[in-house]
Amino acid sequence: MISTMLNKLTNKIPKPARLALALVFWLFVWQIVYMIIGSDIIFASPLSTFKRVFELAATLEFWKNCANSIFHVLFGFVAALIVSIPLAALTARFKFINLLFSPILKLIKATPVASFIVLALFWLKNGVVSFIAFLMVVPLVYSNLSEGFENMDKGLIEMAKVYKFSFIKKVRLIYIPSLMPYFVAACSVGLGFAWKAGIAAEVIALPGSTLGLEIYNAKIYIETVDLFALTVVIIVLSIIMEKAFMWLLKKLSQKILRGGGKNA
Amino acid sequence: MLKLTGISKSFGEKKVLENFSYDFGEKGVVCISGASGCGKTTLLRIISGLEKSQSGDILLSGTVSFMFQEDRLLPWLSAWENVACVLNKKSAERKARAFELLKLVGLEGNENEQIPNLSGGMKRRVAFARAIAVEPDILLLDEAFTGLDEENRKKLSSLVSEAAKDHLVIMVTHDSEDIDSLADRVVAL
């Protein structure tokens, strides 16, 4: 009875307002926890955290750090897409490729990211962060797309054969729309992984001015407020990048499906 | 024109077609009937090139179109786009032709509907419109009228008869009424 009433009430609230309410609730919880602990050195308050975010945002160095971190993560992510998409397509065509790559990809998935970061430090002079982001995203996109190819409606492929669809037409009208849900899911999770692993790599590898270096400094100088502020910034950047990428992907797939604004 | 000679096909141990020969000719409606699993659909698949026979010869001239037992429509496109996508014409011409064909099968006003929003019978009619859109010399119909009401069944039947005046229509059906009303020749498997 109470649950039904609460569910009805929740459904009546518009989605943005629901999100704002949830955010306010957790900010409130955050503030309460801070008040119980009562020390900015152990647990920063929401107020001091957001104040610090604005202080950081007023400096040129902060934006430089953000740009570098975005570049590292994005480079690794895009490189992973460039490698894993053709690899999954080849696997769908030649099963032995899956036989070859499957153990390696399982190994990458199971290996702790910290081990890869240290190994990458031994192997590479530059690009450790991008390499780590790349390693985290490849198995994810590859396995999702392989599953997409596996579950593809073979009836549509036969239909395309009967009606003599060109290769481009098949890709545009059958392969891309069929694989898109798998690709979107992989990219959504993959971007989050790339950010997490990328920042961890920055903290360990310290590749010049980055958000990871600032987190490292916060650790050294026990600047808990800085750590909280930088974490908020990274979360916001990760969400913005995911939303922007998903929007771009949606527009692109619509454009491809409609043949660049014409029709099927 | 279509002539099959000595066609055999097995799936593992199971022989589906054995030494099948038939001269389908150039026009008219040829109905293929028989019990489930006797190879009716396999025969259409061999004619369309989707399946290879293990022996025999196929003499075929002209274009082939196939309306499958399942609709096999692209669910992310609208009804008219599903018809237009098989046409090799300019964009505006394709759209006009697709609208024209959908009107013929009684789907006027539903051209812009997305496939998941259509009923089973409506989907069959979109699939039929797509099959005749390419103006094939040989039209293969696999249980084309399944799920259609009486009115639309008649509409599609008259379109099949019309097409069969100049082209060859090979139709797999279980329905004796369809055979009686449409068939110029019957092949029992």
Image (cartoon, rainbow, N blue to C red):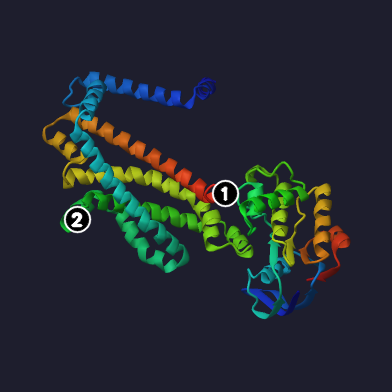
Does dot 1 land on a helix, a strand or a loop? loop
Name the quadrant containing residue B131: bottom right
Q: Residue at x 64, y 64 (%)?
A: A162
What amino acid type is highlighted by mark number 2?
Answer: Leu
Instruction: Using the image, name the chain to which the residue with label 1 belongs.
Output: A
Q: Is residue A98 left or right of residue B38?
A: left
Q: Is residue A88 left or right of residue A63?
A: right
Q: Is residue A92 left or right of residue B106?
A: left
Q: Residue at x 20, y 26 (%)?
A: A55
Contact? badges 1 and 2 (CB < 8 Å): no
Q: Position of residue B42 (x, y in %)?
A: 69, 68
Q: Nearer the viewer, residue B61 or A79?
A: B61
Q: Nearer the viewer, residue B181 or A162?
A: A162
Quadrant of the drawing holding the C terminus of chain B: bottom right
Label 2 Cα crowd, 10 Å radius (few <14 / some 14-19 / many 20+): few
Residue B105 seen by the camera: no
Nearer to us: label 1 or label 2: 1
Residue A149 position (above or below residue A246): below
Instruction: Using the image, name the chain to which the residue with label 2 belongs.
Output: A
Residue bearing the label numbered 2 = A119
What amino acid type is highlighted by mark number 1?
Answer: Lys
Q: Position of residue B108 (x, y in %)?
A: 74, 44
Q: Nearer the viewer, residue B35 or A173?
A: A173
Residue bearing the label numbered 1 = A262
**How many numbered marks have been drawn onto this rendered protein structure?**
2
